[in-house]
Image: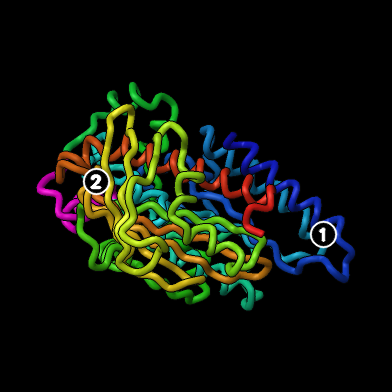
Amino acid sequence: QLQDSRILTTSHLVEATKLTPPEQRPRLFISASAIGIYGDGGDTLLDESSPNGTDFLADLCSAWEKPTKSLLSYDVRVVTMRLGLILSKEGGFLSKMAPVILGNGKQWTSWVHISDVTKFVKTCLSDTRLQGPFNLVSPNPLTNSELTKIYAKKMGYPLTIKAPEFALKLALGEMSSALLTSQKVAPKNLLSLNYSFEFSDFSKALDDIYQNDGFLDNFHIVNQFVPLSREKIFPFFSRAENLEVITPPWLNFKITKKSTEFVEKNILIDYKLKIHGIPIKWRTQISEWKPDQFFVDDQLKGPYTKWHHRHLFDVVPGGTLLRDEVTFRVPGSILGKIFLLPWIRKDVQTIFSFRKSKIIELQKQGKFD
């Protein structure tokens, strides 16, 4: 799966570019890769001129980059982003982060804020000096121990714990190398062009991402494109009973009461459902309501300590981007976040994955028309 999703996808795009008539051919090809290409570097400072590593992930990155090299003879400018660990509220590295020091904690971690990734891509469009590989990482890498302690302090955890190397290898097998490998990487090629990072300090990057959110808050964000206008799509989502249609059957989700016939601001909606066989009652209030654009529901009573769900309908070329932004807290305060969150997050992901598939099915059936 790792190989096919990266190597085959890139190869197909490269071949499609080659087959495009010269007058229509893209002038720029931006390809993703990762700093995993350098392998375990220990305390050595790695840059774009450093040799490739020899482990599985290094070989994967090398094979991932290889297809794009043939585009140089087609007069296409190729930029390869060797990405570090990306900091974002939308999944990725921080969604797995916990106040746990991995192994001895001395391994180096090279990170980058999502804003610097998007800034780099935009810069590539206009700055023709950008060509070849670029390490997309902050100029200030941290050891795993340093990074974890800063994260724990920012997020309000009272302490950090250690996960011994043998335990990680026992639990994760070969993939434990992704957590224990040391990569102290410098963005040498970018710095030589006087490129300026928006976030080079890890602590300030966390401040920007979480802002005023509580340290117990968790986030789940889903984007889905539908090739229809939002005027066609919004009415379906504005009818409370349709929530039953896009909810997995195993939840036995049923609406039991509404305070008003039509969905509007401040309407109260009562549901009943089963989570892993346990009967649950849930009451939601629509706290914000702007037809065709967005609405917000907040849990007043239910299984979560907090559930704040923004439903956004953004107009984009060719259709509508459905965007769900969920902020939630699990029961049990800090202990709940440490021990319950992995299972609850998995349930949330499963529910929204079903929802995305169901929306595709309904669109094909013409249910939004």
Give the residue at x 29% y 24%. Answer: 166
Q: Secondary structure at mark 2?
A: loop
Amino acid type at mark 2 = Gly
Residue 286 position within the rendered picture, expressed as x and y whole percent measured from the top left:
33, 63
Pointers 1 and 2 in contact (CB under 8 A)?
no
Asked whether residue 113 is in view, the answer is no
Specify the principal SS of the magenta part. helix
Looking at the image, is mark 1 or mark 2 nearer the viewer?
2
Res 344 seen here: yes
Q: Earlier in the sequence, mark 1 or mark 2?
A: 1
Describe residue 363's horizontal placement relative to residue 174 as left or right.
right
Q: Is residue 203 above or below residue 305?
A: below
266 to the left or right of 34: left
Residue 298: in magenta span: no
How packed is label 2: few (under 14 Cα within 10 Å), some, or many (20 or more)?
Answer: some
Q: Position of residue 287 (x, y in %)?
A: 30, 66
Of residue 341 and residue 250, the one placed in the foreground of this image is: 250
Residue 73: mark in rendering: 1
Q: Nearer the viewer, residue 317 or 204?
A: 317
Residue that numbered label 2 is attached to:
302
